[in-house]
Protein backbone atom coordinates (compact mmCIF):
# COMPACT_ATOMS: atom_id res chain seq x y z
CA UNK A 1 0.00 0.00 0.00
CA UNK A 2 1.15 3.60 -0.44
CA UNK A 3 3.34 4.56 2.50
CA UNK A 4 1.11 7.27 3.92
CA UNK A 5 -0.71 6.88 7.22
CA UNK A 6 -4.49 7.22 7.07
CA UNK A 7 -5.32 10.73 8.24
CA UNK A 8 -7.26 11.23 11.44
CA UNK A 9 -10.55 13.09 11.44
CA UNK A 10 -9.56 16.72 10.84
CA UNK A 11 -9.95 18.89 13.88
CA UNK A 12 -9.70 22.11 11.88
CA UNK A 13 -12.54 21.35 9.45
CA UNK A 14 -15.21 24.07 9.43
CA UNK A 15 -17.74 23.39 12.15
CA UNK A 16 -20.01 26.40 12.56
CA UNK A 17 -22.60 26.45 15.27
CA UNK A 18 -25.35 27.06 12.69
CA UNK A 19 -24.46 23.99 10.61
CA UNK A 20 -24.04 20.40 11.83
CA UNK A 21 -20.43 19.26 11.25
CA UNK A 22 -19.64 16.35 8.99
CA UNK A 23 -19.37 13.12 10.96
CA UNK A 24 -17.36 9.97 10.43
CA UNK A 25 -20.58 8.10 9.73
CA UNK A 26 -21.34 10.54 6.90
CA UNK A 27 -17.94 9.82 5.36
CA UNK A 28 -18.54 6.07 5.63
CA UNK A 29 -21.93 6.39 3.95
CA UNK A 30 -20.31 8.32 1.09
CA UNK A 31 -17.77 5.47 0.81
CA UNK A 32 -20.55 2.87 0.52
CA UNK A 33 -22.33 4.91 -2.15
CA UNK A 34 -19.08 5.36 -4.09
CA UNK A 35 -19.37 1.76 -5.33
CA UNK A 36 -22.26 2.99 -7.49
CA UNK A 37 -20.57 6.13 -8.82
CA UNK A 38 -20.86 4.78 -12.39
CA UNK A 39 -24.40 3.45 -12.02
CA UNK A 40 -25.99 6.43 -13.84
CA UNK A 41 -23.18 6.91 -16.37
CA UNK A 42 -24.25 8.89 -19.44
CA UNK A 43 -22.60 10.50 -22.47
CA UNK A 44 -23.55 14.03 -21.46
CA UNK A 45 -22.11 14.30 -17.96
CA UNK A 46 -20.41 10.88 -17.55
CA UNK A 47 -20.27 10.03 -13.81
CA UNK A 48 -21.59 13.32 -12.42
CA UNK A 49 -25.04 11.95 -11.51
CA UNK A 50 -23.55 9.05 -9.58
CA UNK A 51 -21.06 11.48 -8.01
CA UNK A 52 -23.92 13.65 -6.75
CA UNK A 53 -25.76 10.61 -5.38
CA UNK A 54 -22.63 9.68 -3.41
CA UNK A 55 -22.75 13.07 -1.68
CA UNK A 56 -26.39 12.89 -0.56
CA UNK A 57 -25.42 12.01 3.07
CA UNK A 58 -23.40 15.26 3.14
CA UNK A 59 -26.28 17.19 1.59
CA UNK A 60 -28.63 15.96 4.34
CA UNK A 61 -26.12 16.82 7.03
CA UNK A 62 -25.43 20.37 5.83
CA UNK A 63 -28.79 21.57 4.52
CA UNK A 64 -32.41 21.18 5.55
CA UNK A 65 -34.18 23.54 3.11
CA UNK A 66 -35.17 22.52 -0.42
CA UNK A 67 -33.54 25.48 -2.18
CA UNK A 68 -30.10 24.85 -0.69
CA UNK A 69 -30.34 21.14 -1.46
CA UNK A 70 -31.23 21.84 -5.08
CA UNK A 71 -28.27 24.21 -5.40
CA UNK A 72 -26.01 21.54 -3.87
CA UNK A 73 -27.09 18.91 -6.40
CA UNK A 74 -26.84 21.34 -9.32
CA UNK A 75 -23.20 22.00 -8.44
CA UNK A 76 -22.42 18.30 -8.84
CA UNK A 77 -24.56 17.46 -11.88
CA UNK A 78 -22.23 19.29 -14.24
CA UNK A 79 -19.75 17.38 -16.39
CA UNK A 80 -17.32 15.30 -14.35
CA UNK A 81 -15.31 12.18 -14.99
CA UNK A 82 -12.57 10.28 -13.18
CA UNK A 83 -11.26 6.81 -12.62
CA UNK A 84 -14.03 5.13 -10.56
CA UNK A 85 -11.69 4.17 -7.71
CA UNK A 86 -9.74 7.43 -7.61
CA UNK A 87 -12.93 9.51 -7.72
CA UNK A 88 -12.85 9.12 -3.94
CA UNK A 89 -10.31 11.96 -3.76
CA UNK A 90 -12.71 14.27 -5.61
CA UNK A 91 -15.50 13.21 -3.23
CA UNK A 92 -13.34 14.14 -0.24
CA UNK A 93 -12.41 17.53 -1.68
CA UNK A 94 -16.07 18.20 -2.48
CA UNK A 95 -17.09 17.41 1.10
CA UNK A 96 -14.38 19.75 2.41
CA UNK A 97 -15.44 22.66 0.20
CA UNK A 98 -19.18 22.06 0.59
CA UNK A 99 -18.74 22.23 4.35
CA UNK A 100 -16.83 25.49 3.97
CA UNK A 101 -19.55 26.87 1.67
CA UNK A 102 -22.27 25.93 4.16
CA UNK A 103 -20.26 27.76 6.83
CA UNK A 104 -20.52 31.02 4.88
CA UNK A 105 -17.34 30.93 2.78
CA UNK A 106 -18.74 32.20 -0.55
CA UNK A 107 -15.42 31.57 -2.35
CA UNK A 108 -15.69 27.83 -1.73
CA UNK A 109 -18.27 27.41 -4.51
CA UNK A 110 -16.10 28.66 -7.41
CA UNK A 111 -13.08 26.87 -5.93
CA UNK A 112 -15.04 23.62 -5.91
CA UNK A 113 -15.93 23.92 -9.59
CA UNK A 114 -12.35 24.72 -10.61
CA UNK A 115 -10.90 21.98 -8.45
CA UNK A 116 -13.17 19.31 -9.89
CA UNK A 117 -12.21 20.39 -13.40
CA UNK A 118 -8.52 20.03 -12.55
CA UNK A 119 -9.01 16.61 -10.97
CA UNK A 120 -10.62 15.09 -14.08
CA UNK A 121 -7.34 14.49 -15.91
CA UNK A 122 -5.22 13.87 -12.80
CA UNK A 123 -7.44 11.16 -11.31
CA UNK A 124 -7.93 9.54 -14.71
CA UNK A 125 -4.21 9.36 -15.47
CA UNK A 126 -3.14 8.08 -12.05
CA UNK A 127 -5.98 5.56 -11.77
CA UNK A 128 -5.62 4.17 -15.29
CA UNK A 129 -1.90 3.63 -14.93
CA UNK A 130 -2.13 2.13 -11.45
CA UNK A 131 -5.15 -0.15 -11.86
CA UNK A 132 -5.90 -0.80 -15.54
CA UNK A 133 -2.25 -1.02 -16.66
CA UNK A 134 -0.67 -2.63 -13.59
CA UNK A 135 -2.82 -4.08 -10.81
CA UNK A 136 -5.60 -5.58 -12.97
CA UNK A 137 -3.52 -7.58 -15.51
CA UNK A 138 -0.92 -8.71 -13.00
CA UNK A 139 -3.57 -9.78 -10.48
CA UNK A 140 -5.07 -11.92 -13.26
CA UNK A 141 -1.69 -13.50 -13.98
CA UNK A 142 -1.07 -14.24 -10.28
CA UNK A 143 -4.54 -15.76 -10.03
CA UNK A 144 -3.87 -18.03 -13.01
CA UNK A 145 -0.64 -19.19 -11.39
CA UNK A 146 -2.41 -19.94 -8.10
CA UNK A 147 -5.21 -21.84 -9.83
CA UNK A 148 -3.21 -23.83 -12.40
CA UNK A 149 -1.62 -26.57 -10.24
CA UNK A 150 -4.70 -27.12 -8.03
CA UNK A 151 -7.18 -29.94 -8.57
CA UNK A 152 -9.06 -29.90 -5.27
CA UNK A 153 -12.21 -27.72 -5.59
CA UNK A 154 -11.75 -26.31 -2.09
CA UNK A 155 -8.23 -25.13 -2.89
CA UNK A 156 -9.41 -23.76 -6.22
CA UNK A 157 -12.03 -21.66 -4.42
CA UNK A 158 -9.33 -20.49 -2.01
CA UNK A 159 -7.16 -19.46 -4.99
CA UNK A 160 -10.06 -17.50 -6.50
CA UNK A 161 -10.66 -15.78 -3.16
CA UNK A 162 -6.96 -14.94 -2.94
CA UNK A 163 -7.05 -13.45 -6.43
CA UNK A 164 -10.06 -11.35 -5.44
CA UNK A 165 -8.15 -9.98 -2.45
CA UNK A 166 -4.96 -9.35 -4.42
CA UNK A 167 -6.87 -7.04 -6.73
CA UNK A 168 -9.31 -5.47 -4.28
CA UNK A 169 -7.14 -4.70 -1.26
CA UNK A 170 -5.47 -1.66 -2.90
CA UNK A 171 -8.77 -0.77 -4.56
CA UNK A 172 -10.72 -0.69 -1.28
CA UNK A 173 -7.89 1.07 0.54
CA UNK A 174 -7.70 3.92 -1.98
CA UNK A 175 -11.47 4.14 -2.37
CA UNK A 176 -11.94 4.70 1.38
CA UNK A 177 -8.73 6.50 2.29
CA UNK A 178 -9.03 8.76 -0.75
CA UNK A 179 -12.21 10.28 0.66
CA UNK A 180 -10.48 10.98 3.96
CA UNK A 181 -7.39 12.46 2.35
CA UNK A 182 -9.46 14.62 0.01
CA UNK A 183 -11.51 15.85 2.96
CA UNK A 184 -8.44 16.48 5.10
CA UNK A 185 -6.21 18.17 2.51
CA UNK A 186 -8.90 20.00 0.54
CA UNK A 187 -7.28 22.23 -2.06
CA UNK A 188 -3.89 20.67 -1.21
CA UNK A 189 -5.03 17.20 -2.31
CA UNK A 190 -2.40 17.23 -5.09
CA UNK A 191 0.11 16.28 -2.38
CA UNK A 192 -1.61 12.89 -2.17
CA UNK A 193 -1.65 12.26 -5.91
CA UNK A 194 2.04 12.36 -6.80
CA UNK A 195 2.69 9.34 -9.03
CA UNK A 196 5.92 8.60 -7.14
CA UNK A 197 3.77 7.79 -4.13
CA UNK A 198 2.31 4.78 -5.95
CA UNK A 199 5.54 3.51 -7.54
CA UNK A 200 6.27 1.07 -4.72
CA UNK A 201 2.83 -0.51 -5.13
CA UNK A 202 3.27 -0.70 -8.90
CA UNK A 203 6.65 -2.42 -8.52
CA UNK A 204 5.24 -5.02 -6.12
CA UNK A 205 2.57 -6.04 -8.63
CA UNK A 206 4.95 -5.81 -11.59
CA UNK A 207 7.60 -8.10 -10.09
CA UNK A 208 5.08 -10.50 -8.50
CA UNK A 209 3.08 -10.76 -11.71
CA UNK A 210 6.17 -11.26 -13.87
CA UNK A 211 7.47 -14.01 -11.57
CA UNK A 212 4.05 -15.70 -11.53
CA UNK A 213 3.87 -15.56 -15.33
CA UNK A 214 7.30 -17.16 -15.80
CA UNK A 215 6.50 -19.86 -13.25
CA UNK A 216 3.11 -20.52 -14.86
CA UNK A 217 4.74 -20.75 -18.29
CA UNK A 218 7.39 -23.18 -17.04
CA UNK A 219 4.79 -25.46 -15.43
CA UNK A 220 2.58 -25.33 -18.50
CA UNK A 221 5.45 -26.21 -20.86
CA UNK A 222 6.54 -29.09 -18.64
CA UNK A 223 3.00 -30.47 -18.52
CA UNK A 224 2.47 -30.18 -22.28
CA UNK A 225 5.81 -31.82 -23.14
CA UNK A 226 4.93 -34.67 -20.81
CA UNK A 227 1.62 -35.23 -22.61
CA UNK A 228 2.32 -34.58 -26.29
CA UNK A 229 5.07 -33.22 -28.51
CA UNK A 230 2.46 -31.89 -30.97
CA UNK A 231 0.77 -29.95 -28.18
CA UNK A 232 4.13 -28.48 -27.21
CA UNK A 233 4.72 -27.35 -30.79
CA UNK A 234 1.26 -25.76 -30.91
CA UNK A 235 1.93 -23.94 -27.66
CA UNK A 236 5.22 -22.61 -28.98
CA UNK A 237 3.43 -21.38 -32.08
CA UNK A 238 0.78 -19.70 -29.94
CA UNK A 239 3.48 -17.93 -27.92
CA UNK A 240 5.18 -16.66 -31.07
CA UNK A 241 1.80 -15.56 -32.46
CA UNK A 242 1.00 -13.71 -29.23
CA UNK A 243 4.34 -11.90 -29.36
CA UNK A 244 3.78 -10.83 -32.97
CA UNK A 245 0.23 -9.61 -32.28
CA UNK A 246 1.28 -7.68 -29.18
CA UNK A 247 4.19 -5.98 -30.94
CA UNK A 248 1.81 -4.97 -33.74
CA UNK A 249 -1.13 -3.77 -31.60
CA UNK A 250 0.37 -2.98 -28.16
CA UNK A 251 -2.97 -4.17 -26.76
CA UNK A 252 -2.68 -6.77 -23.97
CA UNK A 253 -6.31 -7.92 -23.90
CA UNK A 254 -6.68 -8.07 -27.69
CA UNK A 255 -3.55 -10.21 -27.87
CA UNK A 256 -4.87 -12.65 -25.25
CA UNK A 257 -8.28 -12.98 -26.93
CA UNK A 258 -6.96 -13.51 -30.47
CA UNK A 259 -4.33 -15.99 -29.32
CA UNK A 260 -6.90 -18.01 -27.35
CA UNK A 261 -9.34 -18.07 -30.27
CA UNK A 262 -6.68 -19.26 -32.74
CA UNK A 263 -5.37 -21.84 -30.26
CA UNK A 264 -8.88 -23.25 -29.72
CA UNK A 265 -9.46 -23.48 -33.47
CA UNK A 266 -6.14 -25.27 -33.94
CA UNK A 267 -7.11 -27.67 -31.17
CA UNK A 268 -10.30 -28.62 -33.02
CA UNK A 269 -8.39 -29.09 -36.28
CA UNK A 270 -5.63 -31.28 -34.86
Image (cartoon, rainbow, N blue to C red):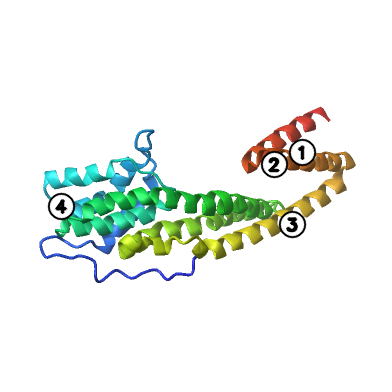
Give residue 248's position: percent from left, percent from top.
Answer: 70, 38
Question: To which quarter of the image does residue 187 belong?
Answer: bottom left
Q: Are marks 4 and 2 in contact (CB under 8 Å)?
A: no
Residue 31, numbered label: none
What is the C-alpha distance between the residues marked 4 and 2?
54 Å
Crowding near pointer 1: few (<14 within 10 Å), some, many (20+)? some
The residue sitting at 80% across, 42% down in the picture is 235
| Residue 166 shows in the view | yes
Residue 102 drawn above or below residue 260? below
The residue sitting at 29% across, 41% down in the picture is 78
Left or right: 195 with respect to 264? left
Query: Which mark sits nearer the N-terminus, 4 or 2?
Result: 4
* Residue that badge 2 annotates: 246
Closer to the eye: label 4 or 2: 2
- Which of 58 and 107 lies nearest the eye of the viewer? 107
The residue sitting at 83% across, 38% down in the picture is 234
Give residue 90's position: percent from left, percent from top.
Answer: 35, 53
Residue 215, numbered label: 3
| SS at circle 2 | helix
* Residue that badge 1 annotates: 241
* Residue that badge 4 annotates: 63
| SS at circle 4 | loop
Amino acid sequence: MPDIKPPSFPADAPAPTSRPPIRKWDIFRVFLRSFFVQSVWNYRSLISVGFGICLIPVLKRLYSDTESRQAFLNRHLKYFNAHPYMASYALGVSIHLEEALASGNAEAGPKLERMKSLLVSILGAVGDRLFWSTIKPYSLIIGMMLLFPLENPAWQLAALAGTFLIYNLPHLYLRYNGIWEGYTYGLEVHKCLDEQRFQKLEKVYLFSGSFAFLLFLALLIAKIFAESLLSAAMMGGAAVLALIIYRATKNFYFTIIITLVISILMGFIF
